[in-house]
Image (tube, coloured by chain):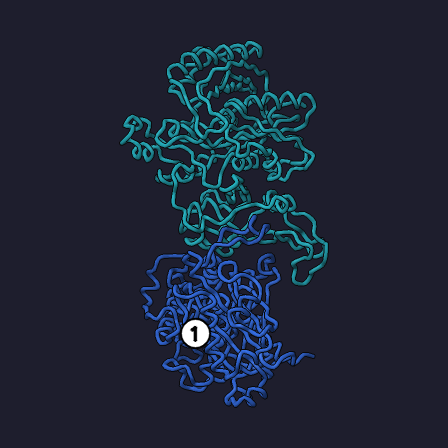
Amino acid sequence: MSIGILAYGAHVPRLRLQRRAAAEANAWFNPGLKAQGKGERSMAGWDEDPITMAVEAARDCLADLPREAIQAVHLASTTLPFADRSNSAVVATALNLPQAIRTLDLSGSRRAATSGLIAAVQAVAGGAGQTLLAAADKRKAKAGSPQEMHYGDGAAALLIGEGQPIARLIVAHTETVDFVDQFRAFDRAFDYGWEERWIREEGYLKIVPPAVKAALGKAGVAADGVSHFCMPGTLPRIAALVAQKCGLPEAAVRDNLAGVCGDTGAAHAIVMLVHALERAKAGERIVVAGFGQGCDVLVLEVTEAIATLPPRRGVTGSLARRREETSYAKFLAFNDLIPLDRGMRAELDKATAMTALYRNNEMVHGLVGGRCTECGTLQFPKSKICVGPNCHKFHTQVDHPFAEMVGNVMSYTADMLTYSPEPPQHFGMVQFRDGGRMMMDFTDVDVGKVEVGMPMRMVFRIKDQDQQRGFTRYFWKAAPAGAAQS
Amino acid sequence: MATGIRDKVAILGMGCSKFGERWDCNAEDLMVEAYEEALGDAGIETKQIEAAWFATGIEEQHVGKSGVPLAVALRLGYIPVTRVENYCASGSEAFRGAAYAVASGACDIALALGCEKLKDTGYGGLPQRGRGVVNSMYWPNLSAPGVFAQLGAAYRAKHGVDAGDFKRALAHISVKSHDNGSRNPKAHLRNKITEDTVMNAPMVAEPLGLFDCCGVSDGAACAIVTTPEIARSLGKHDLVTIKALQLSVSNGTEAQHNSWDSTYFATTRIASKRAYAEAGITNPREQISLVEVHDCFSVTEFVTMEDLHISPEGGALRDVMDGFFDADGKVPCQIDGGLKCFGHPIGASGLRMIYEMYLQMQGRAGERQRKTQPVFGVTHNLGGFPHQNVCSVVVVGLDGA
C-alpha cells in the first residue's frame, strides 16, 4: 500500500469560442487582437460554473469507484460562485457523498490547486483518508481584452489516497513570492494585469526554475529523467524557456492546450497533469508547476497501476467532444458582459426558499429519488405513497440515486416562448432504463438533433440565477449520452 | 349507489362577453357584460340567485382572491359566493359547483361565472408564473406550448406518423377553427387562414407554430342554473339540461410511472368514460352531436379526439383530414371557433363552451347554427400539462334526450 493519485478525471465544456470571432468583433478598437485570433478556447455553457464543472470532473474521476471511502472533498478555484457558502459542500452533495465528510474551498491564487494537491497528499499520509481534489475556473475577462482570448473554462479532479496509486508524489516543493503579475480584488469581476515582459523576466523565469531545481534535487531525480513537464502559462514559449533554464528535456514540455482550450486558471496545472496521465507509462516522471505568488512544484512517478485504470473521458475525451461557437455575442451574453434584453419572462422572481431547499437537498442536489420496497418501482421524487398504480403503499420507499442512471427521451420540444438564456429551451420526458422518469431540462443539445429514444445521461448544472439576491440554483439536466452526439 | 345528476339541472340562462383584447374593459366590466346577458336570458332578477361560483385562474393579475370580486361586481345579495380555481377547467368547475348545489336541493337557482383579464398582464402568451417553492427547484423551464408540444414527438414515434403529415393535420385543425370563428361575432380572431399559413408560421415550441396556439384574450361567460321544474314554471320550453359533469385529476402516475407513454391524456380517457356513463351515452362517435374541446394547442385537440373515444386510437389523423370534425362533418368540433379563435381567458373558457352548446341546442347560433338538431353536446377542458393535469368533461343535451 502506498499513497498517491488513485484516479483522475476532467471536464472541459463542449462549446469552443472561435477566437477569430472575438478578434474580428473587437478589431475596430484593437487591431492587434487579430494576431491572437487563432484556434479556439473552451467556453462554459450558460448553465456551467466552477461548481458544476468540478462535479463533472469528479464524476469522471470517480467513475465506478466506491464513493463511501472518500473522506474529504477539496475544491480549488479563483472564481467560486459563493463567497459565503461552502462551494465544496455543494460538490459533495451533488456527488451524493456521505454527510460525514470534510470539505474545503481553496482559493486566492492560481496555484490553489497544486497547493491543495500537496496538502491532500500530506493529509492522506497523516491518516486523513481518501481525498477528492477538484479544480475548476471560469474567469471573466473584459470584452476585447487579451485575457478573453487566452482564458478557457474547465475543470479536473484527482482522487488521492492509499492503495495502488497510478502516480506517486515523490516530492513537492513550494516557494512563496508575493509577485503580483495580475490581481483581482474581492469586489471586482475582472483580473488586472501588469506588463507581460516583466512577468516573464522577473516572474516566471526567476521564480519557477529555482523551485523546479530544488524539487528535483530533493527528489533525487535528474532533470533529463523527466518525461512530462506540465507548466501552465499563456506567455509565448514560457514553458520551453523555463524547461531550458532547468535543464529539462525539450521533448518533456507538454502542450499547454492554448490552441484548443485556453488557460483554465487555477485548474490548469491539474488539467495538464490529467492530460499527461492519460498517456503516461509506468516509471515515467512528471513535473508539475503551479505558478501564482510563487510556485508549487510536484515531482510524480507513474506506477504500473496506470495500465489497470479503466479509461476516463478525461481531458482528451472532453476536448474531442466539442461544438464550435462562432457567435461572439453569445459569448458576451453567457458571461453577462452585455445588457441583453431578456424579455418580460426573465423577470420571474427566482427566490429560493432555503427551508424547502434544505428539506429537499438530497433530491435537488443529489438527484436522489425513491425505490418502493414493496413493488420495486423507481420514482422521482421520492414520495410517502408509492406511485405504482397497483401498489400505493404508504412509507415503503427508500433512497435511490438517479444521477448515474441512463435514460431515453420519450418526448421533447424545443421551446421558443419560455425564457431561456440559450433559446430554444429543450426539455422533455426522460424514461430511465431501470425504471422511473422525469420531465426535465436538456442541455448540450443542438437544434434539430433531438429524437425520441435518444439515450441521455444526467449532468449537474445551473438551473436558475436569482439576479435579485445573487443566488445560484442547481439541478440536474439530461444531456446526450452517446459520445458521437455529445 | 350514486345515480349522477342527469336531467336534474337545467340551464335557465347564459351569457358571454365579446372575447378579445378588451383594452377598454376591467374584469368587472366583462363580468357584468356576461351576467347581464345571462340574467336577461333567464328572465329573473339578481335577488333570485341563491348561491354563486366564481372561476378565475390567474387572480393575482386581475381581481384578487375570494368570492368578493364577483359579489361586488354583480351586486349579489349577500349570498354564498365561492371562488374556484382548477387550472383551465376552472369555468367548468364553477358550473359544477352551481349545478351540484341545485341538484342537491340546497338552492333553487345558482350562478356560475368565469372571467379572466389576461391583457392586463403585459405578456403576449400566458404570463410566466412561479410554481411553488419545491417544484421550482426541479421542474423544467417550460412554457405551456412547450409542454403540450411533448405530445407531438411521442405520438409520431408511437404511431409512426411522418412529421409533415402530422403537421398538416394540426394545420387542418387550426384552419377549421378559424373558418368557424369567422362566423362568430363574439370570437376574438375572425380571420380565415390557410394550411400553408399554419405550416410556415414561426415556431413557438416544436412542432407547434404560432397558428397551432390559441389566442390570449380577455373574456367572461356566465350560466344560471335551476331545476327543470322551476325552469318550466318560469315559462321555459325546449330545456337544455345537464347530462353529466365529470372531473379527473392526475395523481402523478403519468409524471412518475413508466406506464404512460406521453401520447394521450389519461384523465380525459377516464373523465369521458365516466361522463358517458352518467349521461347514458354508449357510442360516442355516433351519439355525440357537437364537441367543444380544450384546443389550447392544435395537438391537444388532435389527441383529445381519441381520448374522448370518438376517434379510434391512432385514428385521429384520418378523421381530421377526412373533415369528420369540420362544421359540416359528422361531429363538428369547435363550431364556435374554439379556444383557437376565442382565446383562452382561463376562468371563462369552460363556460364559453357550454354557452355555445346551449345556443346550438336551442337553434340560436345564427350563421354557424348546425342544421341538424344537436342532441348531445360535450365540452372538455384540460388544465396543467399532459403529464399532470385536471380534465373536465361536461355533457349537456335536450331535456329527455
Q: Nearer the viewer, residue B350 or A179?
A: B350
Residue where numbered disc 1 is placed? B334
Q: Quadrant of residue A336?
A: top left
Whether residue B238 is visible here, answered yes or no, is: yes
Is B283 situated above or below A395? below
Q: Quadrant of the N terminus of chain B?
A: bottom right
In percent of width and height, residue A437 lies at 58, 54
Q: Specify whether residue B21 is in view.
A: no
Badge 1 density bin: few <14, some 14–19, many ≥20, Cα 10 Å: many
Using the image as rendered, state which of residue B52 and residue A266 is in the foreground: B52
**Percent coordinates x, y for residue A426 in the rendering:** 46, 51
Q: Residue at x 50, y 15 (%)?
A: A178
> Dot 1: what SS?
loop
On screen, residue A45 above or below B188: above
**Could you tell me residue B159's position as x and y percent?**
47, 64
Quadrant, the C terminus of chain B:
bottom right
Q: What's the amino acid at mark 1? A: Gln
Q: Where on the picture, by quarter, is residue A40?
A: top left
Residue for point 35% across, 35% down: A18
According to the rendering, which colour does chain A have? cyan
Nearer-the-camera pick, B32 or A277? B32
Give the chain letter for blue: B
Quadrant position of residue B388 = bottom right
Depth check, front residue: A175 or A251: A175
Chain bearing tag 1 is B
